[in-house]
Amino acid sequence: MYIVYALIVLGGLGLLLGLLIGLCNKFLFVEQNNYVEEVYELLPKVNCGVCGNPGCMQMAEAIVEKGVSVDLCRPCKMENKAAILEILAKQKEELKK
C-alpha cells in the first residue's frame, strides 16, 4: 500500500515540476543574437585568452555587441576576419532598417 502512495506522490510531483519547467521555458525565454553564433563559428575556438576574453564565445559577444576589434584575435585567419567584418556590416544594415 505504501508503494502505491509513494508512486502517486512521486508521479504527481514529477508532473507538477515538469509543467513548471515548461511554463518557465515559455515565459522566461531569452532570444539570442544570431550574429554572435555566426561570428563564433568563424573564430578559431582555441580559448587562448590573447584577446583579453576568457573564451571565444565571450570574444564573439564582445565583437558583436560592444564593437571590439576583430584584430585582437591573433590566431584568427585573415579570411575569417574578413568574413566577420562582412557579418558586422550586415548587422549594421539590419539595424538601420
Image: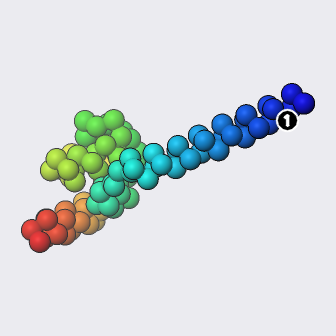
Q: Name the residue under label 1.
A: 4
Q: Quadrant of residue 55?
A: top left
Residue at 39 percent across and 50 percent down: it is 27
Q: Quadrant of residue 51?
A: top left
Q: In this view, does 82 lie above or below 54?
A: below
Q: Residue at x 65, y 44 (%)?
A: 15
Find residue 73 and report its horizontal and vertical position in percent: 26, 47
Does 25 appear above or below 12? below
Q: Residue at coordinates 29% horizontally, 57% vertically from top-left? A: 33
Residue that protrudes farthest toward the right in the picture: 1
Residue 33 seen from this side:
yes
State left or right for residue 2 relative to residue 44. right
Circle 1 sits in a helix, a strand or a loop, which is it? helix
Q: How crowded is mark 1: few (under 14 residues within 10 Å), some or many (20 or more)?
A: few
Residue 61 lies left or right of residue 37; in this view the side is left
Which amino acid lies under the numbered mark 1 shown in the image of this protein? Val
| Residue furthest out toward the top | 2
Q: In this orientation, does residue 39 appear?
A: no
Q: Quadrant of the N terminus?
A: top right
Q: Which residue is drawn at 20% across and 50% down?
A: 65
Residue 43 location (% of width, % of height): 34, 54
4 shown above or below 25 = above
Quadrant of the drawing holding the C terminus: bottom left
Residue 7 picture location, percent across and down = 80, 36
Q: Position of residue 62 (x, y in %)?
A: 23, 46
Q: Is residue 45 left or right of residue 51?
A: right
Which residue is more in the foreground, 68 or 76? 68
Given residues 92 and 28, the one toward you in this image is 28
